Every structure is written in C-alpha cells, then in structure tokens.
Image: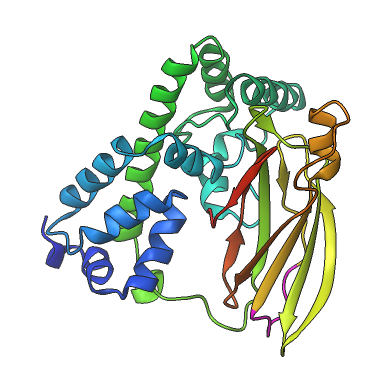
Amino acid sequence: MTSSSVPGLTRFNAADDGAARAALSEVCASTAWVAEVLRGRPYPDVRALLAASDAAVRRLDEAGLDEALAGHPPIGRPTPGDTVSAGEQRGMTGAPPALAAEMRELNLAYQARFGHVFLVCASGLTAEELRDALRRRLGNSRERERDVARAELGRINRLRLTRLVEAAPSASAFTHAPASAPATVSTHVLDTAAGRPAAGVTVALTARTQGAWSALGAAETDGDGRCGGLPALPGDATHARLLFDVGPHLSRERAGGAAFFPEVTAVFAVTPGEHYHVPLLLSPFGYSVYRGS
C-alpha cells in the first residue's frame, strides 16, 4: 500500500515539521524517537513508517527509554484529558473495585521495583489479563523487564502510528487545535535516584497573558507521582510556568539533609487547544524536564 493510497500517510509526509512533530509526540514521548521518525519522511508506505518506528525504539538509550515510559500513565489511571490512553485501557473500565484496588497496589509495587510505569500494550486486554501480566512481570529481573518494556513500547507506537495515518479522516490530524480551546497542563515527577515516583510534591501553575504572570492554582503529586488536577490555562496565555516544591521530598530522601535544589521551575510556550504533559525527572543534584504525551 503506497503513500498515495493512504491519504493520512500522504498528509503526514506533506505536513510541516512542527505539525508532524506534534502528531508524533502524541504517539511517543521520547524526543529521540520523534526526531528519528521525523527525519525519515517521506515514507513510501505504512510498512516503511512502522519499520522506522521499530528501529527508533531499538536505538533508544536508557534515558530515551525512560523518557518514553514517563509519557505513559499507569494502567487504570489515565491522565485526565488523555483520550488515547483511556481508549487503549478500556479493558479496565468497569473493573470490580477489588480488582481496581489490586491494580493500584501492583502498579505501586512495580514502580518501586523498576523505577518506571508498568507499560503494556493494553489494547484488547481485559482487566484480569492486565492484572495477570503485571503480576508475572513483577518477577522479572531489571534487565529482562527493560527488554519487555521496550518491546511493549514498540507495539504501542506501531498501533498509534497506524491509527494516525490510516484512520485520520482529514488534514486536521496534522494541524494545531483550534484557538478557541484552552491549553491544559499535567505533570509527573519521577525520583530517578530512588527509582520510584515522587509523591506529595506541591506543583504550582502560573500563566503569562499580555506580558503579566498570574497564579492559577496548585496541586500535589499522587502516589504515582502524577499531578493531573491543574486548572486549564486562560485562552490568551502565551506561556506557562510550573514550580515544583521538591525540597521537602529531597530532604526526606536524604534523611533530613538540605536539598541542593529546593525548587525546580519549568517555563514553556503554549498554544491554545494543546495539552502539555511536562514530566520532571529528579535526582539530588540534577533534574530534567521535557514535553511528554
């Protein structure tokens, strides 16, 4: 099947770099993966696009794999507004309360053991099958689990890319959202030194409109290190700022020692209608932030 016979692929090949990059960032949070797939355009057919994705996943270094994994929510707890993950995890919809509670506990145990979210290609799996997969993989070694997570990432990327280019009904899949919708922000804090999510970190959100900054609200990261309850940005916002109060968390991890970085600030440009998931990878003497999905 050639590019000309798949209109979505034709539009993807012809889209400007910004629009194509934004579309790919919704597929995978790894900036290295996005850059490599973007460089491969134009693709003659969907098979070539998927092969490029597979190769890019294989070439991800450890930091790139962590970046990709951090862009995925825990099974059973999709990020608010993330309709893609919610759809992929629909097997958890209506799960009995006891099973849902067990999944939360297993997710926490997994993150404590491996330092990242449990990633599985959840499309078509029932809640029981997802739970059983999580139970099995808790017994893996770290090296084995990294290989499994990488393979699952590849499967998810293939499914999302296929939907992107084969199911896109119009060019709107490769354009920015309309300006009438407000931009939204979420985040996820992962303590890379401790190998687990950073819970209880206060995150404050401010927005810049007409050159002035205004406070919008604050929330705390949950047990998964996620903070999805931040308010939407004003419609005329041009920039957003996240202030992470990481001092208390780092002090606790260092048995009361003073935090070298008591606060982390991330300022980024925003476009109305876009969702910005901006995770923080934290350690006692360094940190990084990036746009995830």
Drawn side of residue 192 relative to residue 156, left or right: right
In x, y percent, where is residue 173? Answer: 39, 69
- Which color mode does the image show? rainbow
Q: Residue at x 46, y 20 (%)?
A: 145
Residue 73: name its quadrant: top right
Q: Residue furthest bottom?
A: 210
Q: In the figure, 209 relative to 101: above or below?
A: below
Residue 115: name its quadrant: top right
Quadrant in which the N terminus is drawn: bottom left
Drawn side of residue 18 relative to residue 73, left or right: left
Q: Is residue 4 magenta?
A: no
Drawn side of residue 56 relative to residue 271, left or right: left
Main SS, magenta residues: loop
Q: Residue at x 63, y 57 (%)?
A: 81
In x, y percent, where is residue 239? Answer: 65, 76
Q: How many marks?
A: 0
Residues in magenta, as a range = 232-238
Q: In the figure, 19 relative to 212: above or below?
A: above
Q: Residue at x 50, y 38 (%)?
A: 66
Q: Residue at x 44, y 28 (%)?
A: 149
> In this orientation, does residue 281 appear?
no
Front in this rendered view, residue 56 or 11: 56
Q: In the figure, 106 relative to 199: above or below?
A: above
Front in this rendered view, residue 109 or 173: 109
Drawn side of residue 150 relative to residue 223, left or right: left
In x, y percent, where is residue 74? Answer: 62, 36
